[in-house]
């Protein structure tokens, strides 16, 4: 397991297109992925702050993370650790880095939707102090999710 000190977040660059293709979008052509990265670099989605960042352990990109503004004081964060890099503590370290980043930006609340069947994500949220009311909601895609909240 990597220590938090060797973990970092950085913007994706077009040089990362091949690793993203290999790890996340194997059926996409590189130019489509480069265009996606350029969209991520804009820092906005639907007129709200949005960051998609590379999670690195040393020099290696081991996953992607996102921070999305829900309102002036609330955001959602997301983590995807690449296959082959899981179960090494990266998700926990990434979540802590994202919580610090969100607090530094000025958010007061993190609210995340977690699929009811995603036991590892539920365990991670609970381990880090997120709270849920246990009610099963349907998200915009019709999937059953739990809502997890964290006060910064």
Image (tube, rainbow, N blue to C red):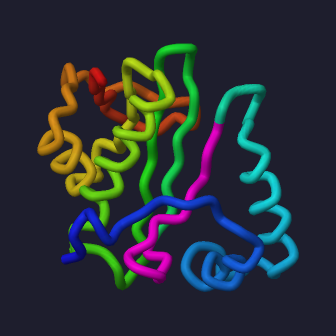
Residue 117 rendering spot, x and y as whole percentages: 28, 50
**80 left or right, relative to 130:** right
Q: Residue at x 37, y 21 (%)?
A: 109
Q: Residue at x 28, y 65 (%)?
A: 5
* Image vertical order of residue 83 relative to residue 149, above or below: below
**124 left or right, relative to 39:** left
Magenta-drawn segment: 50-62
Determine the image quadrant of residue 21.
Answer: bottom right
Determine the image quadrant of residue 148.
Answer: top left
Residue 119 rendering spot, x and y as whole percentages: 21, 53
Q: As drawn, which residue projects farthest toward the top?
A: 72
| In the foreground, 120 or 129 | 129
**54 left or right, relative to 31:** left
Residue 132 rendering spot, x and y as whole percentages: 21, 25
**34 left or right, relative to 54:** right
Determine the image quadrant of residue 130.
Answer: top left
Residue 105 rendering spot, x and y as whole percentages: 50, 29
- The quarter of the picture where the N terminus appears is bottom left
Q: Residue at x 56, y 14 (%)?
A: 72
Q: As drawn, which residue projects farthest toward the left?
A: 127
| In the foreground, 64 or 58 | 58
């Amino acid at each position: 397991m990597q220590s938090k000190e060797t973990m970092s977040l950085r913007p994706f660059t077009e040089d990362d297109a091949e690793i993203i293709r290999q790890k996340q979008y194997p059926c996409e052509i590189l130019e489509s992925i480069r265009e996606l990265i350029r969209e991520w670099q804009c820092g906005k989605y639907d007129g709200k702050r949005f960051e998609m960042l590379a999670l690195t352990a040393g020099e290696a990109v081991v996953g992607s993370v996102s921070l999305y503004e829900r309102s002036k004081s609330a955001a959602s964060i997301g983590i995807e650790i690449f296959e082959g890099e899981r179960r090494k503590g990266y998700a926990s370290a990434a979540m802590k880095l994202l919580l610090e980043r969100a607090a530094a930006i000025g958010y007061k609340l993190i609210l995340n939707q977690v699929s009811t069947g995603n036991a590892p994500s539920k365990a991670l949220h609970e381990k880090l102090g997120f709270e849920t009311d246990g009610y099963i909601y349907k998200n915009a895609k019709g999937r059953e999710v739990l809502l997890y909240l964290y006060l910064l």
